[in-house]
Image: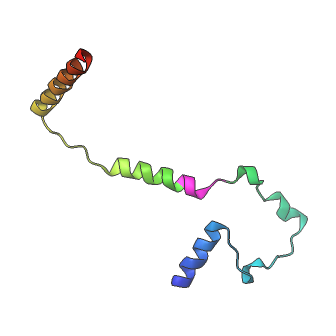
Amino acid sequence: MMKYTETELKKKKGIVEHEEQKIKPRNAEDCLYELPENLHISSAKKTKKIFSNQMLNGIPELDVGINARIKTVISAEDAKVHLLAE
């Protein structure tokens, strides 16, 4: 299992071992199915974005009640008045 994870990490980082450097003979049709380098999507950016969305969606909203909301609004208004007075 450790060997598999190490090889997968090396693949993601772009490190290729000597055994995996064997070049397969390609025909002209194989070139049609390859993507240009500018169209490749980085998986690291994609996973960070997905992870961020999952974290935000996983946070449950807690109903604190109307009294707590009113106290928060009043304290925010008091802080605003205090800040403008300075």
Residue at 78% from the left image edge and 59% from the top image edge: 34
Q: Please indicate whether residue 38 sits to the left or right of residue 52 in the image.
A: right
Q: Which residues are magenta?
A: 41-46
Q: Position of residue 14 (x, y in %)?
A: 67, 68
Q: Please say if 38 is above or below 16.
A: above
Which residue appears farthest toward the left when viewing the image? 67
Query: Relative to the observer, which residue lies in front, 31 or 43?
Result: 43
* Quarter containing the C terminus: top left
Query: Relative to the observer, which residue lies in front, 54 or 84?
Result: 84
Q: Please indicate whether residue 14 sits to the left or right of residue 60 in the image.
A: right
Which residue appears farthest toward the right when viewing the image? 28
Magenta highlight on residue 9: no
Q: Please say if 12 is above or below 47.
A: below
Q: Position of residue 43 (x, y in %)?
A: 59, 57
Query: Relative to the observer, which residue lies in front, 17 or 82?
Result: 82
Residue at 43% from the left image edge and 50% from the top image edge: 52
Residue at 56% from the left image edge and 81% from the top image edge: 4
Residue at 65% from the left image edge and 53% from the top image edge: 41
Q: Position of residue 62 (x, y in %)?
A: 20, 43
Q: Please indicate whether residue 47 sits to the left or right of residue 52 in the image.
A: right
Which residue appears farthest toward the front when viewing the image? 86
Q: Position of residue 56 (x, y in %)?
A: 36, 47
Which residue appears farthest toward the top when viewing the image? 85
Q: Please say if 18 is above or below 26.
A: below
Q: Please say if 77 is above or below 18.
A: above
Question: How would you classify the magenta stretch by its main secondary structure?
Answer: helix
Instruction: Name which quarter of the figure residue 30 lies in.
Output: bottom right
